Image (cartoon, rainbow, N blue to C red):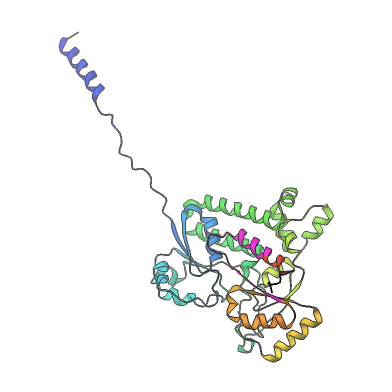
Amino acid sequence: MNRSIIILLLTLCVSSLFATPSIKNKVAPGPPKKLNIITSLSVLAELTRELGGDFVNVESLSSADQDPHFVKALPSFKRLLGNADLLIQIGRSLELWVPQVIASSGNAKLISGSGLITASEGISPLEVPKALTREQGDIHPQGNPHVWLSPSATLKMAANIRDALIKIDAEHKAIYEKNFASFKEKLAKKLFGEALVKAANNNDFLWRLHEGHKLLDYVKTRKLALGGWIKEAEAINYPFFTYHSVFSYLAHEFSLKIVGQIEEKSGVAPTLKYLSELKKKAKEQKITHIVAANYYVGHKGLITTLAKDIGGHSLFIAVDCKPKQSYFEFIDQLLRELVNFKTPVKPAA
């Protein structure tokens, strides 16, 4: 073999031993870009986190101790809404303060309405007024807006939020659908009980029975065990007054016995004559319980005085998710407090 060729081959071999391997400059994928979602209520924030997972940053404009009808705009709202991809509200004239904060946000998507999502869309309303007059007080033309206290209604809100996320982030559609399916499964187990969900082996069938008020007949006919929140709520079998019609959807879901409101009309304080009528009603129907949302603590004097006059007790209770409290934990706590309130502990003398 030609000596020059041999030398060349040896040179190439030695060079290859010490040469730095050729590596393509690949940029490691960074964390996924997250959607900025703002909600009017904490419960909507928790639902969005549940469905959006790692692909959303979520903040609520209000907290569980605030009346959602009246939320005072903060300077931080402009920054939050200015960067928002979506603003999710309950709707039904609950958050009348939302249009003002949208107008000052400078966010074209929100101002045009394309980025504003109404979570209560498609939910059958309760207490829709037959006529719209100021004589009825502060009414909601589209019906009672406190829909999130119904797990059935909340499932529909979750579906609306899922669809909104998919619309602006189709790339992660499969993940949003998977998270919704997981939420729906867990909600069914919490509402109906794990044993019944397992026995039926068809959650959609159970939801249809429940919404059609045929679930109890199905359970009795098949000799199945009803559990979950529905079973727990059976212990809330006492009649009670509320201050405002916050608990209507909860009562409708679990057949609770709300017998009247302390407000004479929505948003209108009671007259002495009306309070006298409530006391008479309490005596006739043996009503000794009053339940009010925690943000009505400003009316505590009125509420506790009425409770004393009817020989009963009052309970102020959170009606929205507290920080880091899931929807499931929220309803767990709400029902537990109402069950315990059946026989309230008397304060120490």
Q: Position of residue 277 (x, y in %)?
A: 74, 87
Q: Give x and y (percent) for residue 207.
A: 70, 58
Given the current orientation, which residue lies at the most extreme bottom position? 273
Tell me residue 129's x, y (percent): 66, 81
Image height check: is 277 above or below 207? below
Residue under the image location 55 percent in, 71 percent down: 65
Relative to 272, is 90 above or below?
above
- Give the residue furthest to the front: 349
Rendered residue at 41%/54% (across/down): 33
- Is residue 193 something that shows in the picture? yes
Q: Quadrant of the N terminus?
A: top left
Q: Classify residue 244 as left or right of residue 259.
A: left
Q: Residue furthest top?
A: 1
Q: Is 32 on the left-hand or right-hand side of 149? A: left
Extent of the magenta region: 313-336
Number of numbered discs on residues: 0
- Quadrant of residue 136 within the rendered picture: bottom right
Residue 73 in the image, given as x and y percentages of width and height: 45, 75
Q: Nearer the viewer, residue 243 or 108?
A: 243
Query: Quick check: 224 above or below 257?
Result: above
Task: Tell me the residue at 70%/87% (across/down).
Answer: 275
Q: Quadrant of residue 304?
A: bottom right
Q: Is residue 253 visible?
A: no
- In reply to whether residue 335 is colored magenta, the answer given is yes
The quadrant of the rendering that contains the C terminus is bottom right
Q: Nearer the viewer, residue 129 or 45?
A: 45
Q: What residue is shown at x 58% (from left), y 54% (from top)?
A: 180
Please tell me which residue lies in front, 78 or 294.
294
In depth, the one of 195 and 142 nearer the eye is 195
